[in-house]
Image (cartoon, rainbow, N blue to C red):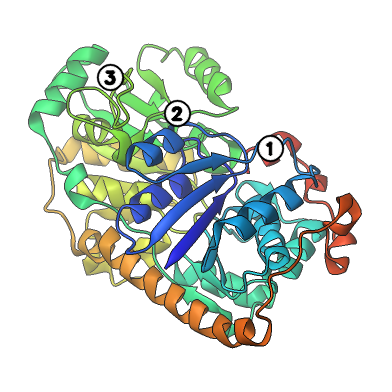
Amino acid sequence: MKVLHIITGLDVGGAEQQLRLLLRRLPAHCEVITLTDPGPVAHGIEADGTPVTHLGMTGNRDLTALPRLAGMIRGGGYDLVHTHLYRACVYGRIAARMAGVRAVVATEHSLGDAVIEGRRLTRGVRTLYRATERLGTATVAVSDTVAARLRRWGVPEQRIHVVPNGIEAHRFAFDPAARALVRTRLGLPLDAFVVGGAGRLVPGKRFDVLVRAVTQLPGVHLLLAGAGPEREMLRRMAEQFGSGDRIHLLGERDGAVDAMADGRAADGRPADGPDIPGLLSAIDVFVSPSPDEAFGLAVLEALGSGLHVLYGSCPAVDELPADQAPGARHFSLGVHELATALRELRRGGPGRLPVPPVVRRYDITRSAEALMSVYEQAVAAAAPVRRRNPAAVPPPQGRTAALPAAAVSLPDPSRSPDPSRLSKR
């Protein structure tokens, strides 16, 4: 089976890293097109042996991307197209239809109750999503929580398939040597109580709650990995509370996929700080304050390192019995409650826990097997359509002909209130 993956961008992020992990295990010939941002994950995917093509899309209204993308799909002879992230799903589904490919799968990585990938779910965003979703064959939800949201949106039950995200658990195993090395390099006392967090530094992740909670705990250090528009605000907040020397904003980390023990990324680029496994070994407690997650990969990775975890939202844990993740504890979003919980853990000396069953449940190999089953069903469903329409759809002539009539009047996703964030997705 020949599969084309289309994704909005390949900078460091959960969906991007998840795609790379899956590409390593899918028993299919895969290629990747990124609409924008061929960042570090693109380099890693290419280092793994999967070709990546940059479409060079200039923005949400770059309709010239449609005929170019359709031409690439048509010329590639793909059996199936798989789209990832909002903009790629919108353009990719339309382009696949234009190219005559009927087996189209889309993964919904980050659908919240009120936002999708950080953008508010305005009427225009919802309408465009629903209209283009009908052009696909199947929509993959990364959790039961996301599947329920898709049903509420009106996506038919038979089109929804739950394929949970997965991790490589062995990469996150606690390493005492890495703990000492990371703390030494960052100038942290070896006996200090250190809290950790990781994610995009955007308002919806609520890292301001985490920073403020740590400022209330004298002697406690915070290692926060991630990049985003709130970085400077968080730095100023730490300074304002006199805790600038204890709040360490580490910037973007390559995470579980690119990290190597010798301090270099998997594609050979030098690493400029601890990777995510090293960070997890160095800390004592992990905190994920986000109140609205689609899955909760960061929580799983922390549990894989034997850490106690405090979280605001994690469907990967909440959808299972409590004994599957005994080290994970939900907290309501509040500075005082988080500070109290951290104070209690510090007093008890949290130590390391056995890796809980939930980590083994979400093994990336199982995710790849489940996704391949969705592919096979989608290709089988598309086969009768191919027999009735053996001729390929001819290339469109001119910009007007590039858009199907049904797509011309669709709302523009750039009307969402945060265009700067839309450019990333």
Helix, strand or loop at label 1? It is loop
> Which quadrant is the C terminus positioned in?
top right
Please indicate, yes or no, whether residue 339 appears anywhere in the rendered image: no
Q: Are marks 2 and 3 in contact (CB under 8 Å)?
A: no
How far apart, in angstroms, are the residues tagged by discs 3 and 1? 40 Å
Looking at the image, is mark 2 or mark 3 nearer the viewer?
2
Question: Could you tell me how far apart the alpha carbons at marks 1 and 2 are, in whole angstroms?
Answer: 27 Å
Quarter where residue 178 is shown: top left
Query: Which label number is shown at residue 211?
Result: 2
Residue at position x 20%, y 19% in the image: 183
Residue 115 placement: quadrant:
bottom right
Image coordinates for residue 182, horizontal then vertical, percent: 21, 21
Whole-percent x, y for residue 28 in the image: 37, 63
Q: Which circle's residue, 2 or 3, is located before the other in the chain? A: 2
264 displayed left or right of 57: left
| Number of the front mark, 3 or 1 | 1
Q: Quick one: label 1 or label 2, which is nearer the N terminus?
A: 2
Residue 423 numbered mark, or none: 1
> Residue 44 location in percent, x, y?
37, 36
Image quarter in which the N terminus is found: bottom left
Residue 219 disc label: 3
**Who's the residue at 24% across and 36% down the image?**
277
Q: Secondary structure at mark 3?
A: loop
